[in-house]
């Protein structure tokens, strides 16, 4: 175990160096990247190797600077993108049975999330996404029928990498940003927009030929709107309106008013409520058969509480706290970009496809509704009487189906036929034939 950890440190140190302007990779850097992939695929249940790479910050110091410089090298870029996808893999996908419930497993789980949050802040650079934009555009320009398997895998890996970066949860306590300030998530979205990758994602989701990548693009669009509300996206604009400014001022004044009321109603910290006096509740006996003594004034007798001074059960902090749904307002430029690009282009085209599909289903339903039900019998159409043909009761025969000729009537149609027995061996019929004249 310690040998592989030392091997990871040696491999990361031998990847290359930066001279201040561009990143210089070592000649055997490709073999080092492949070796890191090999180690990560053989990680333990406690994800020791993944955590060691995260604490070494090899992605922030080497990989994100290596990608723009060597993106034109096919083999180098392919191995590097594979490693980035593995490192940014969501934490929940590493645990098949859900988040761990034990104390050590929870600590490892939270540690992996902290590492991913550090990775996400490294992807706010435009050069990284600009390099991936060129690779993705070159592969999408090839027709889907002529596209090779390697090009399809490259498209899928780039889309999965975008999904992995966007799915990392935010950490408001560490960022310490205002509501309208650009968070790390907003910076990543802005970098995607500046590089042009969002336009390619919208092209893929609106193209019927790229249906195999539609699910990845839908995940990306869903993660773009994280922590956003429909009201904020609909009102997004480059300039703040007067109503928005007045609303923010009113919210600020209301928050200050609530804080002032809360501090003014607080009693002095050293004064206890029982110093105000004691009270006796008549006609309510205690254990000693005397009137109950209460140390606080009560408006109603039913509001007396005997459990107030009991020690409450200590809350267990060993379980992972479920994340509450958080909504926030992004920077105005980012919100305007989301509302303009995604809502007006991809969502409208996807909605048009869904409307065409619903219309086709509606036409099919109308076509099948004109057919008679399969369980309807022809006898419901009426009864017919055959003249001059008597039944057993010396009356005219009643027929439940129209007949072209009287001779086509069949009285054995509703009789149950005798089931053929297959238990007896079929007797072979005696076959006789004439032989050739020469044989005779």
Image (cartoon, rainbow, N blue to C red):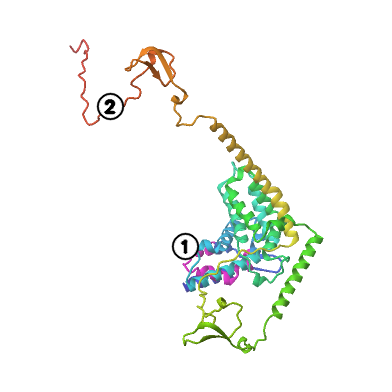
Q: Position of residue 357 (x, y in %)?
A: 60, 40
For the point 45% across and 25% down, which residue is it?
378
Q: Choose between 295 and 330: the one closer to the eye.
A: 295
Horizontal relation, residue 152 to residue 125: left or right: left
Q: Residue furthest left?
A: 440
Q: Tell me the residue that label 1 is attached to.
A: 97
Image height check: is 252 above or below 138? Answer: below
Q: Position of residue 403 (x, y in %)?
A: 43, 16
Magenta stretch prevailing secondary structure: helix
Bin the neighbour count of mark 1 within 10 Å (Cα to Cα): few under 14, some 14-19, many 20 and up: few
Q: Position of residue 361 (x, y in %)?
A: 58, 38
Q: Answer whether residue 39 is magenta in the image.
A: yes
Q: Secondary structure at mark 2?
A: loop
What mark, if any, has residue 418 been given in the picture? 2
Q: Is residue 36 visible?
A: yes
Q: Choose between 182 and 374: the one closer to the eye.
A: 374
Decide which of tag 2 and tag 1 comes sooner along the chain.
1
Looking at the rendered image, the disc whose residue lies closer to the viewer, 2 or 1, is 2
| Image quarter in which the C terminus is found | top left
User: Magenta residues, as a range?
Assistant: 34-63
Q: Answer whether residue 38 is magenta in the image.
A: yes
Bin the neighbour count of mark 2 within 10 Å (Cα to Cα): few under 14, some 14-19, many 20 and up: few
Q: Is residue 37 visible?
A: no
Q: Residue furthest right?
A: 242
For the point 46% across and 31% down, which residue is it?
374
Image quadrant where residue 87 sits: bottom right
Q: Secondary structure at mark 1?
A: loop
């Amino acid at each position: 175990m310690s040998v592989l950890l030392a091997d990871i440190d040696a491999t990361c140190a031998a990847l290359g160096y930066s001279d201040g302007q561009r990143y210089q990779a070592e000649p055997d850097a490709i073999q080092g990247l492949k070796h890191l992939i090999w180690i990560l695929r053989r990680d333990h249940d406690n994800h020791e190797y993944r955590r060691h790479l995260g604490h070494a910050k090899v992605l922030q110091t080497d990989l994100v600077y290596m990608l723009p410089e060597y993106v034109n090298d096919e083999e180098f870029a392919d191995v590097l993108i594979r490693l980035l996808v593995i490192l940014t893999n969501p934490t929940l996908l590493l645990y098949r049975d859900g988040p761990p419930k034990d104390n050590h497993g929870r600590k490892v789980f939270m540690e992996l999330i902290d590492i991913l949050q550090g990775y996400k802040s490294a992807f706010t650079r435009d050069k990284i996404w600009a390099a991936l934009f060129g690779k993705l555009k070159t592969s999408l320009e090839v027709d889907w029928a002529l596209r090779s398997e390697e090009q399809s895998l490259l498209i899928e890996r780039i889309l999965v990498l975008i999904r992995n970066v966007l799915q990392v949860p935010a950490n408001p306590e560490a960022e310490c940003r205002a509501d309208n300030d650009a968070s790390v998530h907003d910076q990543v979205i802005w970098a995607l927009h500046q590089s042009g990758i969002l336009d390619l994602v919208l092209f893929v989701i609106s193209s019927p030929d790229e249906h195999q990548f539609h699910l990845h693009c839908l995940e990306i669009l869903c993660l773009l709107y994280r922590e956003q509300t429909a009201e904020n996206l609909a009102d997004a604009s480059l300039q703040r309106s007067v109503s928005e400014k007045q609303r923010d001022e009113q919210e600020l004044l209301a928050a200050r008013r609530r804080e002032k009321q809360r501090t003014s109603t607080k009693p002095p910290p050293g004064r206890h409520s029982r110093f105000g006096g004691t009270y006796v509740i008549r006609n309510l006996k205690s254990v000693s058969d005397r009137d109950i003594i209460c140390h606080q004034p009560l408006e109603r007798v039913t509001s007396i509480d005997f459990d107030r001074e009991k020690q409450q059960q200590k809350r267990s902090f060993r379980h992972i706290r479920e994340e509450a749904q958080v909504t926030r307002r992004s920077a105005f430029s980012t919100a305007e970009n989301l509302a303009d690009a995604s809502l007006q282009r991809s969502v409208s085209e996807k909605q048009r496809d869904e409307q065409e599909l619903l219309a086709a289903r509606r036409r099919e339903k109308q076509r099948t509704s004109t057919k008679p039900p399969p369980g309807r019998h022809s006898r419901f159409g009426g009864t017919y009487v055959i003249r001059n043909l008597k039944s057993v009761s010396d009356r005219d025969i009643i027929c439940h189906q129209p007949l072209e000729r009287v001779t086509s009537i069949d009285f054995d149609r509703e009789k149950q036929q005798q089931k053929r027995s297959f238990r007896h061996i079929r007797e072979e019929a005696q076959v006789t034939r004439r032989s050739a004249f020469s044989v005779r």
